[in-house]
Amino acid sequence: MNSPNDYSLNPPSWVTRFLWWCAGADNYFLNISPKQDRVKYAGIGGIVLCTGILAAFSGGFAFHTIFGPKGDAMEISRMTTFLDIVGSMIFGFCWGLIIFNLDRFIISSTGKGDGTDAITGKEMIQALPRIIIALILGFAISAPLEIKILESEINAELQKFQEGYVQVLNKETDKVANQQKAVLEKRKTEYEFKLSVFQKELKVYDDAIDNLVAVQQNEMQDKRAYGFGPVAKKMQSDIDNKKVEKEKFVKDKEKEVQALNQQLTKVNTEIDNYESDLRKAYAKNKEVAGGYSGLLKRIQISHEIGGLIPWVILFVFLAIETGPIFFKMMMNKGVYDFLVENHNKRREVENGIWKEDFAFEGKEGIIHLEKWHYMETENAKIEKMKKLGAQKHLSEKAIEEWEKAKLDELSKNPHNFYSEGNRSTNDNNA
């Protein structure tokens, strides 16, 4: 029959050592601990490692969704460029390292509590800050992975939303465009009316000149043999005067007519560009609707169409994130824990630090008190007190000897300690 001393442990592989490191455990003591302790801490390290890996994927998906291309929900995957993929991978890797380091710190700083498999209220209160941090990390990790898992369904629903939103925007655009077109048509009518008034006024002059010319021709037709007489000259003078009036009218109206023509040309150009501007507005509306393909909208759609699935995913990640904390509180102390505790206490004693426990019975039961001893501090305090005591004794002795010397000098030379005479008497009687 083999004795306990014959119990041998195989050297741990590099994978096991790495998992121990992920759990924040000490490889030295685990190497000499039973297999049960080795497996426990390797399992905890595996959870921490997997959480970091999932966080890396989650961060990469979140980065791509937030900073990646925006547009038609079904076309976004085709818009992704190589730089988008590289940027998402770098960000995801950094995010995974951050979460991994936080989880490793949380797990390594979580103690065993009372060392039993029961989780007491005191242990829960002590672990509450770590649990809150783990819950926050669980929410942060689960959301991007949730929308990635439901990506196909989310894209289909997002496509419907974008198309409906485009129609709403286009209706608003048509309403505004029709109002603008009505304004342009009204301005065009006003300009054309003013130009038509000018043309009518100009036609009055032309008709008058044509009538005068016709009368002159009729008058001269029957009297060609008499030549260009006084009557014909008078008619010609009337025609010339009317032409001068026309020219003066045209000159007076020239700037006004030119301005009207320019404004009419501008309005016609704007009306001609109406369809082109409308198509640009429609394209802009589609771009705006495509902006609703980010992380927030996808999470919203996920919870609208996913039913219980998003909550199941969330609770799974919360369990993964908080599990190691509860596992450590439920773990019984093993050989590894006692080895580490013994080593730490021995190092404390070697450095002049130890704890002294006291128990008192109070009104509410047994009261446990701890007193920590710091030998270097206490020795320094004792040395300082002795130095101060010695200095006090020396000072008292010096004052005593000084007093004796002064008394001896007084007995021998009392006149050195007081003075009197005429000057002193005069001063006193002054």
Image: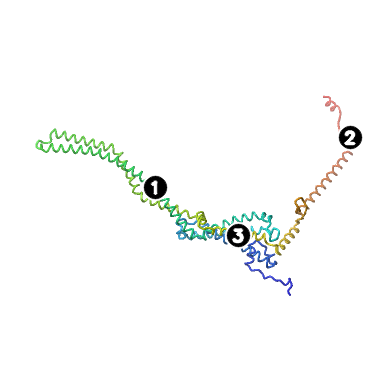
Upstream in the sequence, badge 3 or badge 2?
Answer: 3
Instruction: Depth check: give the residue in front, 325 or 7.
Output: 325
| Dot 1: element | helix
Q: Quadrant of residue 322?
A: bottom right
Residues at marks 2 and 1, CA–CA distance in whole angstroms: 121 Å
Secondary element under disc 2, as helix, strand or loop, is: helix
In this view, the residue in front, 351 or 214, is: 214
Disc number placed over residue 39 in the picture, else none: none
Check the picture and name the quadrant holding the N terminus: bottom right
Task: Measuring from the top left, give residue 363's x and y in whole percent.
Answer: 76, 50
Colour scheme of the picture = rainbow
Q: Amino acid at mark 3?
A: Ala
Classify residue 141 by image quadrant. Answer: bottom right
* Residue 175, label in figure: 1
Q: Which residue is mark 3?
A: 319
Upstream in the sequence, badge 3 or badge 1? 1
Q: Secondary structure at mark 3?
A: helix
Q: Give the residue type at disc 2.
A: Pro
Chain-order first, disc 2 or disc 1: 1
Crowd rating for badge 1 (residues with CA inside 10 Å; few <14, some 14–19, many 20+): few
- Between the C-alphas of marks 3 and 2, the distance is 97 Å
Mark 3 and mark 1: Cα distance apart in space:
53 Å
